[in-house]
Every structure is written in structure tokens, then in C-alpha cells.
Amino acid sequence: MDRVDKMVGGQADVKLVSNAMANATRRKIMTMLLEGNRTMEEIAKSVPSMLDYHLQMLQQAGLIEIKDGLVVLTDFGKNFMETKTVKPAEVKTDLAGTRSLEVVELRQLLPCIADSTKFRIIARFEPALEGALKLLEPLFPRARYSERIGALIIQKGNILITIYSTGNVTMTMIRSEIEARETLDDLKRTINEAIVKGVTPVPREKIRVDHAEIYQYLPKTDCRICGEQSCYTFAIKLVGRETTLDKCTPLLEAKYTTNLEHIRALLEYL
Ligand code: SF4
């Protein structure tokens, strides 16, 4: 039996899923969501027409849901994408054949709830680095390649930059568009130099992520939905791996998009 059939449970559902995924725009939306939740406005930047229709098709197939203006993959949607996503063919052993990067998009500036003077950026490098991405980890003192999400996470001061193997880039805690452009140009320069001259490892710095830092980005409402007495206790347990981030469902609200993305990236350093 087909894996999709098993997960959804019936032939009619399989048809809904295959109809939903037969369209390139909807596949693009699903790939974006695999890299993180998005607001409708963010998706609309890449899908300027018939967005409601495409989202409805994906919703009917049970692949996505919309909560408080935030579009998220359902568990089924995540399973489906993990099954169907074509992973990078192979992790490369050197950068031979890798082409120089260009910044082709810088898409969104959303205020951050933890600090309203900071923004979240979505950008794109082309061509995608795919299997070469992991090789770039030694170029940055505070970088960590995550096999789980297929991304390189780089900490630069308070800024967290996540470069996905697909070429998408997200940055949190950015002060201005100028800082975003300078940060991207810096990254591009470092990576392109490595493509031409080879990777010269820099001394690595140990990154310590503690509960106080995680707490900064939690909603701080002490609502106890996560089952803990307070957000502070939740942060302690999160760092101690005694609980999981998905238990804090208030973080799924659109206004916390930046916070959620930032905490997710921080947790990759644990
Ligand atoms: S669910 Fe989230 S906001 Fe509520 S107490 Fe737990 S950590 Fe805090």
C-alpha cells in the first residue's frame, strides 16, 4: 500500500492530496512551510494570485491549517513532506562545481514581539547550496549545521541566521533593512570566497544557550497551557530537554512568529 494511502486512510483522501500537490504553486507553499510557519502576508509575497484558493486546496487535503493568521503544516502535512521531500542528492565532500551566490530576494520585515525595534527577514540565495551547505560550517565561529532541518544556523551577536539547503534564508533580531543587506552581503562574500579559494576554518566559539535567553522570547504570560507553572519553568525544562517547544501553543500565534523561529534556531545549539 502506498505510504500516503496509509497515512490518510482512504482513496478519496489520497485523491485530495494528489490534486493538492499536483500544482507547482501549492508545492512551493508546502516547501516554504516545511522551513517554518508563515503568515498569510509572507506567503502572499511569493504567491501573489489566488492564494486563498491554493490554501483552501491544501487545507481540504489535510496538509495545512491556519491558526490566528499563521499557516502551519499539520502533522500529516509534515509526514507527507518528509516522505516526499527530495533530500539533497548527497552531502558533498568539497565545493568543486559550486557556483557563486547572489542575493535574489529580501522579502519581509516583521517586528519582533520580544523587542519591537528588531525585525525578521526572509531572503534567498541562488543557486541553492544543497549538499555543499554542511561544508560551510567551519567558516563561521558560531555556526551549527543541523541535519534535522537541513540548515546552517549562524549566530552573529544577537542575530540568528538560518540558511536552508534550498537557498532560503531567515534572519531574526535585525535592526533595519540596511543591517539585513549588510549581513547578507557579508555572508555572500565569505561563502563566495570559500567557493573560489576553499574553506579556511576559523577558530570556533562555544555557544551556550541558557534558559534565561530562551525565556526572553517566550510569551511571558504564564498561562500554563504547556503544563508548567510559568514560562520561566518551561524555559528551564526546555533547555533540560524535559519538555518540547510544541507544548507552548501560544507561540503559534502570528504575532510570535519571530519568537518561535528564534527559539527553534537557538535550540539547535543545545
Ligand atoms: S504555554 Fe507558553 S506562554 Fe503559556 S506558560 Fe507555557 S511557555 Fe508560557
Image (tube, helix red, strand yellow):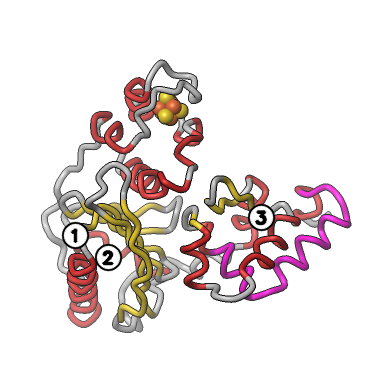
Instruction: Give the CA separation, mark 3 to mark 2.
Output: 29 Å
For marks 1 and 3, the one nearer the N-term is 3
Q: Which amino acid type corresponds to the residue marked 2 in the rendered image?
A: Leu
Residue 206 in which image quadrant = top left
Residue at 54% across, 51% down: 69
What crowding class fits label 1: few (fewer than 14 Cα within 10 Å), some (14-19), or many (20 or more)?
many
Of the residues shown, which amino acid type is indicated by label 1?
Phe
Q: Specify the quadrant that holds the C terminus.
A: top left
Which residue is painted at 29% across and 83% down in the image? Answer: 100
| Along the viewing direction, whichever of 255 and 248 lies nearer the viewer | 255
Q: Rounded to the nearest whole Å, what is the CA distance between mark 1 and mark 3? A: 34 Å
- Reply yes or no: does residue 26 show up in magenta: yes
In the structure shown, which secondary structural element does the residue marked by tag 1 occupy? loop
From the top left corner, tell me how far across and down residue 241 is, in percent.
40, 28
The vertical placement of 29 against 216, above or below, is: below
Q: Nearer the viewer, mark 1 or mark 3?
A: 3
Q: Residues within 10 Å of mark 2 (few under 14, many from 20)?
A: many
Which is more toward the observer, 195 or 13? 13
Specify the segment rendered in magenta: 8-31
**What residue sits 61% from the left and 73% below the top?**
25
Dominant SS type (magenta):
helix
User: Ligand 1 shows up in which quadrant of the image?
Assistant: top left
Contact, CB < 8 Å: mark 1 with mark 3? no
Q: Amino acid at mark 3?
A: Phe
Q: Which residue appears farthest toward the left when viewing the image?
A: 203
| Residue 62 visible here | yes
Residue bearing mark 1: 140
Question: Does the residue at mark 1 contact the one at mark 2 (Cβ under 8 Å)?
Answer: yes
